[in-house]
Amino acid sequence: MKLTNFPILIPAFTAQIAINDPLIITSNLLNIPFVPKAGTLVSEPGYELPLEATFIQGGDFIRRDPDGQWVKLEVTSVARDTSGSLLRFSYNGVVNMAGDEGKVIRGDTNATTTGFGNAFVQIRFETDAPGLKLLQDKLYVGSGRFVIEEDRPVIVEYKISEFSESICVWGPRNKPHIDRSRFLLRMSTTCRVPLIVKLPLKLQVVAPELQSAALLQLQVYALSCGPI
């Protein structure tokens, strides 16, 4: 099956948010405040928009579905980066209450650290900070988990990725053609399984006239996208 025109995910940030005890508004609606100045938002190595920020305030409104199987998240927060610039970090999402995440949200005494895969969010940024305004024009998604440690606040951790269009450049192994206006390259390998790789802003490619594959001097995130 071809995956042409399907978007890909580029690892972008890790968010770790310390939360306080929930405030019960109604039987189906909670507000969970952030612990001020305790959480962090840090970009992944090599991501094109470097960021290191601390959450200074925020809160999550959690609304339970009538059947109790899912909850909906609605979060707004403010973070400050190392330069002092402020940005709004907001997201909405869903959490499956059937797993360990439900124990954490309900406050069960046997709640433990959860895995990823039952909590998903869509994230948006808002800021006027130079160098960060591009965040507003991108769409991000994340997968979350809860981290439970004794005598410490509960941590909500998200692995956040940028949606990106799958525009690739094709070329033989010894003569890859590179479009430097793009960040993506797809090229065949000896096993005929293409890779999608995220290229840094500065790319150096050496393609000698040899049978071996071109030497790509770059730092990449790579994933298999199936046979051509």
Image (spheres, helix red, strand yellow):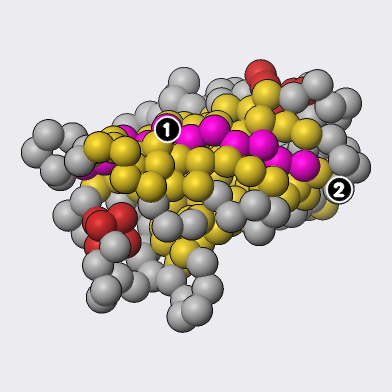
Looking at the picture, how far across and down is residue 24, in whole percent? 32, 45
Residue 142's disc is none
Left or right: 18 with respect to 113?
A: right
Looking at the image, the residue that sits furthest to the bottom is 150
In the rendered image, the vertical position of residue 159 relative to residue 30, given as above or below: below
The residue sitting at 70% across, 41% down in the picture is 79
Looking at the picture, how far across and down is residue 172, in whole percent? 65, 36
Which quadrant holds the N terminus?
top left
Q: Main secondary structure of the magenta part?
A: strand
Left or right: 211 with respect to 161?
A: right
Circle 2 — which element? Answer: loop
Q: CA distance from mark 1 to mark 2?
A: 26 Å
Residue 210 visible in image: no
Q: Which residue is mark 2?
A: 82
Looking at the image, the residue that sits furthest to the left is 67
The residue sitting at 90% across, 42% down in the picture is 83
The residue sitting at 25% across, 57% down in the picture is 106
Q: Nearer the viewer, residue 130 or 61?
A: 61
Circle 1 — which element? Answer: strand
Q: Which residues are magenta?
A: 70-80
Amino acid of disc 2:
Thr
The residue sitting at 50% across, 79% down in the picture is 151
The answer to the question of whether label 1 and label 2 lie on touching residues, with beta carbons closer than 8 A, is: no
- Mark 2 packing: few (<14 Cα in 10 Å), some, or many (20+)? few
Looking at the picture, how far across and down is residue 31, in whole percent? 40, 42
Q: Which residue is mark 1?
A: 74
